[in-house]
Image: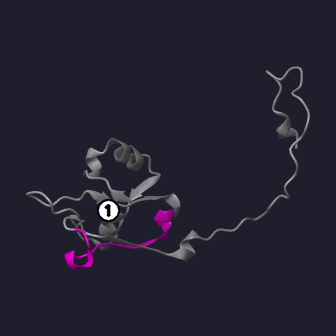
């Protein structure tokens, strides 16, 4: 999340992250879901731009409830609009079906064929 100071399509790392399918643009997700346009976030130049973004990983994507660009009165910044993200906490819960008890690491030196032998911790 942040002030990228560039549109997402102009940021190589953001383009790669979004193309991986592991990261998602919160504004685009809500705009698609609600059939609304994505709003500009910066009003410092001749024309408004969308240079403030929230990228969500796969877990946060499933927890997304809402994303808003707040009106000018809600922001304390002269040129940027505040972004509001609502996540569902219940969407972040998970359970473990089985939890192994911790065991100590093995002690001792490396075996004589340490270069070809599997690590000793695999024998735990």
Residue at point 36%, 48% (across, down): 14
Locate the C terminus and report the quarter of the image it occupies.
top right
Residue 13 x, y percent position in the rendering: 37, 43
| Residue drawn 33% across the image and 41% down it | 12
Give the residue pinned by disc 1.
Answer: 28
**Left-right relation of 70 to 49:** right
Secondary structure at numbered mark 1: helix
In which quadrant is the N terminus drawn? bottom left
Magenta span of residues: 60-77
Image: 80 above or below 9: below
Q: Quadrant of residue 107?
A: top right
- Asked if residue 111 is among those painted magenta in the image, a careful observer would answer no
Asked if residue 40 is positioned above or below residue 84 in the image, the reply reads above
Residue 62 magenta: yes
Q: Quadrant of residue 100?
A: bottom right
How many numbered callouts? Answer: 1
Front-lying residue, 81 or 93: 81
- Looking at the picture, how far across and down is residue 113, in whole percent? 86, 20
Q: Is residue 44 left or right of residue 115?
A: left
In depth, the one of 60 and 112 nearer the eye is 112
Q: Is residue 29 left or right of residue 70?
A: right
Residue located 83% across and 39% down the image: 122
Rendered location of residue 6, percent (x, y): 25, 50
Is 22 left or right of 6, judged from the image as shown? right
How far across and down, in percent of the image, does residue 65 sit? Answer: 42, 74
């Amino acid at each position: 999340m942040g002030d990228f100071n560039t549109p997402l399509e102009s940021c190589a790392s953001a383009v790669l992250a979004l193309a991986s399918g592991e990261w998602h643009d919160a504004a685009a997700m809500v705009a698609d879901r609600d059939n609304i346009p994505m709003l500009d976030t910066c009003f410092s130049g001749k024309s408004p731009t969308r240079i403030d973004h929230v990228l969500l990983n796969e877990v946060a994507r499933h927890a997304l409830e809402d994303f808003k660009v707040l009106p000018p009165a809600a922001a304390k910044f002269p040129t940027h609009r505040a972004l509001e993200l609502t996540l569902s906490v219940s969407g972040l819960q998970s359970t473990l079906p089985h939890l192994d008890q911790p065991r100590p690491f093995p002690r001792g030196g490396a075996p004589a064929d340490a270069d070809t032998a599997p690590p000793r911790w695999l024998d735990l």
